[in-house]
Image: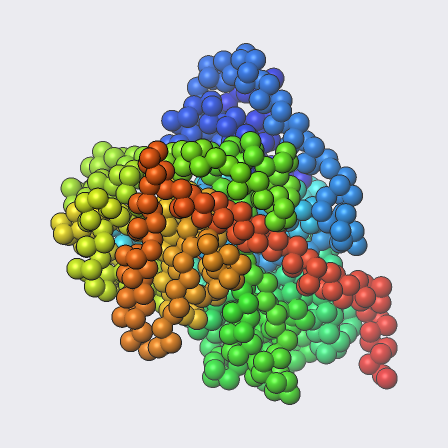
């Protein structure tokens, strides 16, 4: 049972389905469904950041009455509602999973992730990892995979970014009101909020957790919330902020996610057969499941055998800072009353998180690797790097054969392909194409799209991007909070004709956001050629504690103001899923220049490619595979072999040369109709070949076939074999 906290203003009965539809994020990847809300009040919808829950509470009732009396609107409404109901009522046999892996039907997988990027209105993500989890969830819904997501409800979401008049990043706390979000509080049979509890650092002080549900198509996502009446004041803030605090904040959050998450599923009567931990943050769920078995009478060795057999773990980065390592004093404080319940001594317990490179710290990735039988990195290259980083957990195995595989990331195409392009695809691809996005054959007809039509959509998307940026800046200007310098850095001189290059990502140093300024004079010559202008749009946040990242943003801010670049550089504030979707669709070239091999996968380039942009990237992460699959889909730049930073000059030179000799000339090679025929041909090649290969459907199908089916079998094996049998085996 759940309750919705905000009731919208009276909705005419005839269109009352808009309310349940607004509370299922399925609408967000169905342009036809989104259009139902947009139509009610397009300007208000934009102003509310495309949040239909808020829209229904604020739209004038006369707009609703008009819509309910408009035959065209009603026909559109009936069509969308029919599709929505068909989705929710579809018999399992009609789904991909029902048809291909029927043994997974009705056997839920729990998917734990510290963040989920499902929709901009639910800012419980900070970047790529969260958006990937969101895309995984959406594809699970599309494929009919019974997945249950588990995460935290961060009341203050992730920090929004504002730049000062000096280009310094300020981290502004947004307030996530329950009720403004498509969340519903889970209630118990007594009608009171369902509550689970957990001890954080004191076994006698129970912290209560509430559970919120977010519906993502056919899949539910459950968010734990420690901001509960009666909890000690300090604990109420624990789930409020995504990565806001210190290590102690992190260990509390991870206890809530892992241990509270298992308890929440049990309290709701959900018994997953197998489990997937997305990154080490979720690792404590493995301990809690082992504890449950030990409580039933198993030894820790028997319990962990069961946990290992039914668990999947994905690691997402080779960068050391991306792996949580907790010092022993924190483990003592938070787990000294817990490890006895696993039947372990302190030494045995701490050994679960041991990794040579982490000294005596407790490494969450090592824990997850040890207690999950199915492990993967997120691109072929990252699989190799991951094996080389973690092989010492298996001292008897040859390093290259460490039991860690790779499944390359993918993106949810219905979410990331812009609505205008989806409409064009509706005309040229087979009906229902979005049900088979992972199939390369679905995309073959892209090559038959007339150049004029694709060009028109690409120009339209570029104009939409510029409009979006300009409107954002206009509002900031109107608020009186920014000065003309800040306006200038935000890109008021961007135009629709120039070749437009996008670069947006977290400002982590290995991503080298300012590499393109390595030789400012050479860059200026490229950008300001009067007959072949080029413009650059940057976006991205630095971690609040990362002053180095903030300095890189500041450098770009000042470069944007430098008149020698003639207004052709912009920094767009507050990179989130909404800005991201506009950027991927609106740029011609997507630039990525990580310091190889530190980009585990990267996904933004996949989203840009699916919209017809060409990637210009250092060969690292996913792009090694993308460029190899189709070298026409962009430019693959050999990274310099030098890892110490001195390779920067060489990598920058490679980028300038590609721009000067290939990218810019190709874009400006026009025929009598002023169309860049060869460019458009390659743009179609990018969509045709990369979209299916790097779709989240392909990714989730890979997880299913390679990791979920065996993990499910592992879970079932022990379900049929109750705990008592396991204990008896001990005597053998
Ligand atoms: C896709 C996406 C990312 C991930 O981009 P990378 O290529 O991995 O850097 C980050 N943030 C948002 C908002 C995204 O949509």
The image quadrant where one finds the N terminus is top right
- Expressed as whole percent of the image width and height from the top left, the position of residue 206 reads 57, 60
- Expressed as whole percent of the image width and height from the top left, the position of residue 628 reads 51, 62
In percent of the image, x 28 and y 66: which residue is there?
Answer: 653
Q: Is residue 657 left or right of residue 392?
A: left
In percent of the image, x 69 and y 36: which residue is there?
Answer: 88
Q: Nearer the viewer, residue 87 or 493?
A: 493
Q: Is residue 558 left or right of residue 207?
A: left
- Expressed as whole percent of the image width and height from the top left, the position of residue 168 reads 23, 55
Q: Is residue 308 left or right of residue 279?
A: right
**Colour pattern:** rainbow
**In the current view of this chain or complex, which residue is farthest to the front?**
672
- Expressed as whole percent of the image width and height from the top left, the position of residue 208 reads 57, 54
Q: Nearer the viewer, residue 521 or 279?
A: 521
Q: Total of numbered circles in the picture? A: 0
Image quarter of residue 713: bottom right
The image quadrant where one finds the C terminus is bottom right
Image quarter of residue 263: bottom right
Residue 553 visible here: yes
Q: Nearer the viewer, residue 575 or 271?
A: 575
In percent of the image, x 71 and y 53: which residue is there?
Answer: 108
**Picture layout, residue 429 above or below residue 681:** above
In percent of the image, x 21 and y 44: which residue is there?
Answer: 531
**In the current view of this chain or complex, which residue is farthest to the bottom?**
396
Q: Nearer the viewer, residue 450 or 508?
A: 450
Residue 583 visible here: no
């Amino acid at each position: 049972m759940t309750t919705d906290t905000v009731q919208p203003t009276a909705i005419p009965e005839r269109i009352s389905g808009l309310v349940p539809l607004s509370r299922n994020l399925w609408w967000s990847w169905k342009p036809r469904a989104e259009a139902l809300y947009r139509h009610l009040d397009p300007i208000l919808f934009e102003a509310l950041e495309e949040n239909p829950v808020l829209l229904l509470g604020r739209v004038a009732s006369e707009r609703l009455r008009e819509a309910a009396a408009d035959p065209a609107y009603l026909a559109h409404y009936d069509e969308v509602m029919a599709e929505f109901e068909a989705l929710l009522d579809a018999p399992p046999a009609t789904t991909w999973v029902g048809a291909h892996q029927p043994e997974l039907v009705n056997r839920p997988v729990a998917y734990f992730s510290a963040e989920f990027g499902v929709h901009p209105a639910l800012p419980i993500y900070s970047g790529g990892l969260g958006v990937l989890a969101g895309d995984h969830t959406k594809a699970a819904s599309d494929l009919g995979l019974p997945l249950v997501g588990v995460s935290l409800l961060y009341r203050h979401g992730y920090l929004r970014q504002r730049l000062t008049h000096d280009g310094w990043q300020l981290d502004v706390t947004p307030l996530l009101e329950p009720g403004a979000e498509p969340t519903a509080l889970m209630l118990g049979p007594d009608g009171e909020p369902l509550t689970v509890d957990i001890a954080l650092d004191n076994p006698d002080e129970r912290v209560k957790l509430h559970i919120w549900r977010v519906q993502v198509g056919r899949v539910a996502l459950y968010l734990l919330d420690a901001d509960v009446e009666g909890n000690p004041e300090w604990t109420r803030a624990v789930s409020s902020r995504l990565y806001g605090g210190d290590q102690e904040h992190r260990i509390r959050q991870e206890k809530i996610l892992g241990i509270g998450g298992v308890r929440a599923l049990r309290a709701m009567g959900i018994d997953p057969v197998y489990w997937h931990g997305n990154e080490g943050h979720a690792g404590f769920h493995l301990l809690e499941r082992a504890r449950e078995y030990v409580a039933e009478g198993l030894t820790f060795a028997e319990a962990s055998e069961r946990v290992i057999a039914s668990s999947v773990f994905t690691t997402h980065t080779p960068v050391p800072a991306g792996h949580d390592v907790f010092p022993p004093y924190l483990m003592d404080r938070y787990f000294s009353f817990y490890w006895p319940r696993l039947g372990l001594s302190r030494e045995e317990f701490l050994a679960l998180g041991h990794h040579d490179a982490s000294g005596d710290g407790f490494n969450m990735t090592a824990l997850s690797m040890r207690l999950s039988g199915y492990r993967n990195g997120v691109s072929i290259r990252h699989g190799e790097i991951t094996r080389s980083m973690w092989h010492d957990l298996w001292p008897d195995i040859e390093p290259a054969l460490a039991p860690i595989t790779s499944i390359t990331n993918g993106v949810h195409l219905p979410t990331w392909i812009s609505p205008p392009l989806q409409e064009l695809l509706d005309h040229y691809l087979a009906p229902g194409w979005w049900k088979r996005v992972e199939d390369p054959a679905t995309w073959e007809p892209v090559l038959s799209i007339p150049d004029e039509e694709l060009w028109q959509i690409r120009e339209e998307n570029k104009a939409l991007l510029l409009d979006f940026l300009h409107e954002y800046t206009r509002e900031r200007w109107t608020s009186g909070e920014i000065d003309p310098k800040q306006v200038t850095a935000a890109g008021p001189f961007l135009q629709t004709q120039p070749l437009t290059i996008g670069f947006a990502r977290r400002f982590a140093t290995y991503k080298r956001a300012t590499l393109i300024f390595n030789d400012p004079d050479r860059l200026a010559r490229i950008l300001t050629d009067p007959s072949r202008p080029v413009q650059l749009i940057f976006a991205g946040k630095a971690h609040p504690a990362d002053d180095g990242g903030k300095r890189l943003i500041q450098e770009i801010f000042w470069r944007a103001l430098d008149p020698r670049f003639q207004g052709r550089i912009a920094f767009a504030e507050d990179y989130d899923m909404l800005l991201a979707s506009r950027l991927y669709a609106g740029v011609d070239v997507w630039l990525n220049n990580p310091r190889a091999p530190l980009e585990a996968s990267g996904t933004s380039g996949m989203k840009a490619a699916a919209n017809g942009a060409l990637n210009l990237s250092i060969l690292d992460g996913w792009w090694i595979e993308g460029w190899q699959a189709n070298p026409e889909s962009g430019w693959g730049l050999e990274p310099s072999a030098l890892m110490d930073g001195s390779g920067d000059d060489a990598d920058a030179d490679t980028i300038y040369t590609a721009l000067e000799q290939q990218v810019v000339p190709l874009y400006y090679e026009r025929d009598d109709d002023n169309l860049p025929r060869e460019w458009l041909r390659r743009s179609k090649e990018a969509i045709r070949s990369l979209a299916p290969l790097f779709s989240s459907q392909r990714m989730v199908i890979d997880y299913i076939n390679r990791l979920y089916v065996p993990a499910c079998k592992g879970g079932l094996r022990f379900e049929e074999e109750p705990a008592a049998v396991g204990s008896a085996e001990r005597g053998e």
